[in-house]
Amino acid sequence: MSLRPAVEAPVRHEDLDRVLRRLPLWEPPSGFARRVLTRTNASGHSRPARVSILDVIFGGQRAVVSATFAYAGGWVVWQLTPPLIDRAMTAVDACAMFAALVAAAMAANMSVVAWASAASSLSMAAWFTRRNGLWS
Amino acid sequence: MRPGEDGNEQELVQRCLANSQDACTELVEAYSRMVGTVIWRATGDYRVVEDLAQEAFLRVFRGLPRFDGRAKLSTWIYTIAHRVAIDHLRQAGCRPEDVPEGDNDPPVDFDRHAASGPDPEMVVAREELDRLVHQVLAQLPEKYRLALLYAALDDLDYGTIGAMLGVPPGTVKTLVFRGKRLLKERVEAALVPPAGRGGTRAT
């Protein structure tokens, strides 16, 4: 860096603050707002709809997924709790038995489980895609 | 007066969402100065400011339906401006110091205050210090550089800067403190060593 003979160390904090405070502000050139709106219109975002069809779809999707998980969870607990209470002697027994019963229930309802998995995968993929701004 | 300052921020958003071109123009005019300034300070390149400011407002209008009002509108807009600038720097693969010196000078008078000083030597010293600080500032690590440059803006408080940088306000305070210390050290290192310390002039 080149030498600055007119200034000597130590530099005061006030001097640095003064330089920082005097940094210029950007002044928008005339017609800037008009150009922004023209560009916005051209890109198809001149009418920011309050609720877009995608918002409705994603909102509905979230509601359906939440309701499905809540219902499925409740159904599993409702189905499995009585046999667990009847048969399990300890918490460890209950956990093992719970896992076995869930596996058996999934095996008995393979098509439902497959559809639910597919729907949930799609939902999550769509949610991540949208969240990362790839689909606005 | 900025829309948020008299409490009609939400009303402006609602009018923009209702497709009012006047409201959109009002929003751009209210925030364009600070949006451009944030972008200019982050990129250090005056030539790209207008284009990036337009891009920032494009993102603002695109995201306006999802603006939930939890943050202030100004904070939300400045955060978008900051991200546009950072995206530009990352895409261009450059830092501000990579911009050719002299080519990005703004059409404004940097030294308008210094020129009014009565003592010519002091004026020269101030100008030299200004130039040196600008050079050193451009070479500071990004986190310190941005914290210092944003904190020097009256319109940005630590909370707003924290939202822009994605850190808590307390961290902004620390970054500003450490940034100033680093700036001072590096500026002094580039200056003539004081008499008695020995050493040679920096080149």
Image: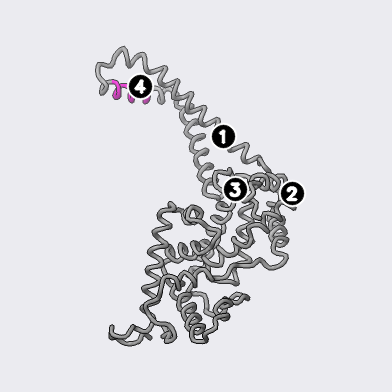
Magenta region, mostly helix, strand or loop?
helix
Do discs 1 and 4 share a chain?
yes
Residue farthest to the top?
Answer: A86
As displayed, is residue A112 above or below residue B177? above
Q: How far apart are marks 4 and 3 (CA)?
A: 42 Å
Residue corresponding to mark 2:
B20
Residue hosting label 4: A101
Location of residue B74 with respect to A110 vertically, above or below: below
In which quadrant will I find the C terminus of chain B?
bottom left
State the image coordinates of residue B60 (x, y, percent, origin top left).
62, 53
Which residue type carries mark 3? Ser
Instruction: Please give the residue where the numbered disc 3 appears in the rendered image.
Output: A136
- Give yes or no for residue B15 being in the magenta stretch: no
Q: Which residue range is magenta in the image? A: A94-103
**Residue B36: x %, y % from top left:** 60, 64
Of circles 4 and 2, the one toward us is: 2
Horizontal arrangement in the rendering, residue B38 relative to residue B197 (left or right): right
Badge 1 is on which residue? A61
Q: Which chain carries label 2?
A: B
- Amino acid residing under circle 4: Leu
Amino acid type at circle 2 is Ser
Comparing A41 with B148, the one in front is B148
Percent of width and height locating residue A90: 25, 19
Same chain for marks 4 and 2?
no
